[in-house]
Image (cartoon, grey):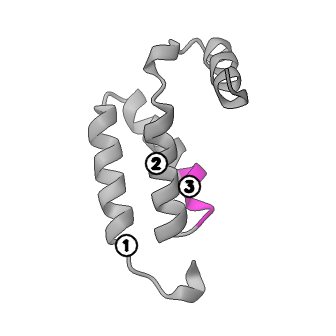
Amino acid sequence: MSELDRWVAAASAELGVPREDVAVTTVLDVARDVAHNVVRPGAPVTAYLMGLAVGRGADPADVAERVTALALSWENSPAEK
């Protein structure tokens, strides 16, 4: 078990979130797309926003797909990255 797996298991248990509900790869993929295409600090903020949306009933796969599409289509100046 990797350190990430151990952390996710511990944090999930602490927060009362079933481990099977945690889509680690999906969150990391979206965070990567935001960090590389928008701005690095946007990655954790986006993960938080995704959690809020899912917690309010949005479909996790749909949230990830929409945010990824937005990040991949984002245009800003190189100085802003």
The amino acid pointed to by label 1 is Trp
Instruction: Name the chief secondary structure element in magenta.
Output: helix
Q: Is residue 17 above or below residue 66?
A: above
Q: Which residue reaches farthest front?
A: 1
Q: Which residues are magenta?
A: 40-45
Q: Tag on residue 43?
A: 3
Query: Could you classify mark 3 by the number of other residues whose Cα lies within 10 Å: few (under 14), some (14-19), or many (20 or more)?
Result: many
Q: Tag on residue 74?
A: 1
Query: Could you classify mark 1 by the number of other residues whose Cα lies within 10 Å: few (under 14), some (14-19), or many (20 or more)?
Result: few
Image spot of residue 21 (x, y percent): 44, 19
The amino acid pointed to by label 2 is Asp
Q: Tag on residue 64?
A: none
Mark 2 touches mark 3? (CB < 8 Å): no
- Whether residue 15 sits left or right of residue 62 in the image: it is right
Q: Is residue 51 above or below residue 5?
A: below
Image spot of residue 43 (x, y percent): 56, 55
Q: Quadrant of residue 2?
A: top right
Q: Tag on residue 29?
A: 2
Mark 3 touches mark 1? (CB < 8 Å): no
